[in-house]
Image (tube, rainbow, N blue to C red):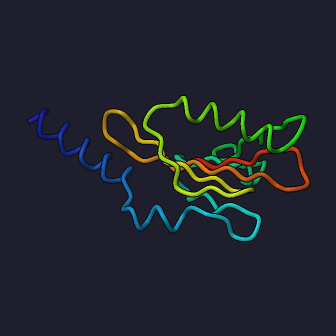
Amino acid sequence: MRLAAFFMGSLILLSACVASEGDLMTRTGMVGTRFQICPQRPNCVSTMANIKDEVHFIAPLTYRGSRESAQRQLEQVLQALPRHKLIKKNDTYWHYEFRSATFRFVDNVEFYFPPREKVIHMRSA
């Protein structure tokens, strides 16, 4: 009986965590110069969330020097991480997917490099 309850609880938890691929695609990308808004679930963080939103807000990265130099450094870090896949990349926006080792969950990680600011905005969901 306990095993069945554990299995059912695990199944419910996993189904709540996994979104369909189409669902994931509707939540990534830029709307103008802003990321998509984080859903109410706590598995999303963004530098563009409201600063008072303690669940979703994270501070952007700052850098000195050129944007190109900061991008090169960030790319070196990302390339060293396992199970990553580049989805989209241009001068100001990058989208990567990372897969968890065990359950193969997808984490969409986005970066935005505003042309006139020395910050890197990030969103992970």
Q: Position of residue 53 (x, y in %)?
A: 71, 49
The vertical placement of 2 against 48, above or below, is above
**Residue that appears at 62% across and 55% down:** 89
Q: Is residue 98 left or right of residue 91?
A: left
In this view of the protein, which residue sits in the foreground, 42 or 100? 100
Q: Position of residue 102 (x, y in %)?
A: 31, 33
Q: Position of residue 112 (x, y in %)?
A: 72, 53
Look at the image and tell me in which quarter the N terminus lies: top left
Q: Locate residue 50: give its quadrant.
A: bottom right
Q: Locate residue 64: give its quadrant.
A: top right
Q: Is residue 25 left or right of residue 124?
A: left
Q: Is residue 19 left or right of residue 86?
A: left
**Residue that appears at 47% across and 41% down:** 84
**Residue that appears at 74% across and 56% down:** 91
**Residue that appears at 31% across and 47% down:** 14
In this view of the protein, which residue sits in the foreground, 111 or 124? 111
Q: Position of residue 45 (x, y in %)?
A: 62, 46
Q: Is residue 89 left or right of residue 108?
A: right
**How many labels sit on residues?**
0
The vertical placement of 14 against 88, above or below, is above
Residue furthest left in the image: 1
